[in-house]
Image (cartoon, rainbow, N blue to C red):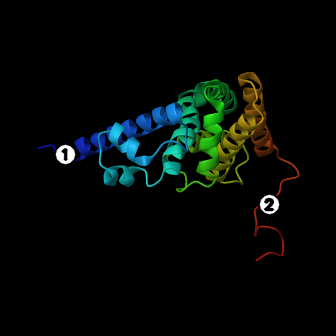
Amino acid sequence: MLDLSEGLRATKKRRTFEDILANGVALFREQGFRGTRTEQIAKASSVSAATLFNYFPTKAALAEAWVRGESDRAVERSASEFEARGLRPALRAACRALAGQVADAPALRLEAWRATGRAREQALSASHPLIAGILREQSQERIRQDLPATLLAELILDAIESGVVEGLRLEHSAENLARGLQARVDLILDGARKRNERVGLPGTARGVG
């Protein structure tokens, strides 16, 4: 007999995560990031403080799930178009969609990014759709194969994140932000496509052991 308990638990955990995140963001919008207390988020989400802590140990962790989650989901949504449209056009479309999204409450999002920090707590999973898209491009010799797909994916995601933060800091319009994000992605992909004057990975240069 099929055991559905694990699936049901996972679904419940995902819903709890999403509920807490949605309520936290709603309170951020209403009271500001600094003005919102974790106890208020727990109460609005109908969970205990201990349960909240299990999902989000700090407000900064919740802020990260919000703003970094937006960037990651924009790329992941574009993954369905990687094969049909190509990696670059799909990522450029993702940049435009993300720029339009973050134009809402830019000051609050900038504060959330500042609380988040730049380092990811976990490395990208090998199954990440961007890595799969890069591997496909490499197999078709559209992207240089001497660089790990994981490294290129991390560079692209970091470029998008840093572009968002910079655009928010400079109060760019959605249109200007989109162009800035696309330029950053293009720069990385152009470098990955270049076949001459390659820069070797650390430890691969002659005489380096």
Q: How many marks?
A: 2
Residue at which label 2 appears: 200
N-term mark: 2 or 1 = 1
On screen, residue 93 above or below 5: above
Closer to us: 88 or 103: 103
Residue at which label 1 appears: 5
**Disc 2 element:** loop
Residue positioned 75% across, 70% down in the render: 203
Residue kind at label 2, given as amino acid type: Gly
Q: Residue furthest left?
A: 1
Q: Quadrant of residue 177?
A: top right
Residue kind at label 1, given as amino acid type: Ser
Mark yes or no: residue 170 visible: yes
How far from the left and from the top, in percent, is residue 101? 60, 26
* Cα–Cα span, label 2 and label 1: 49 Å
Residue positioned 48% across, 42% down in the render: 36
How far from the left and from the top, in percent, is residue 85? 63, 24
How far from the left and from the top, in percent, is residue 40? 39, 42
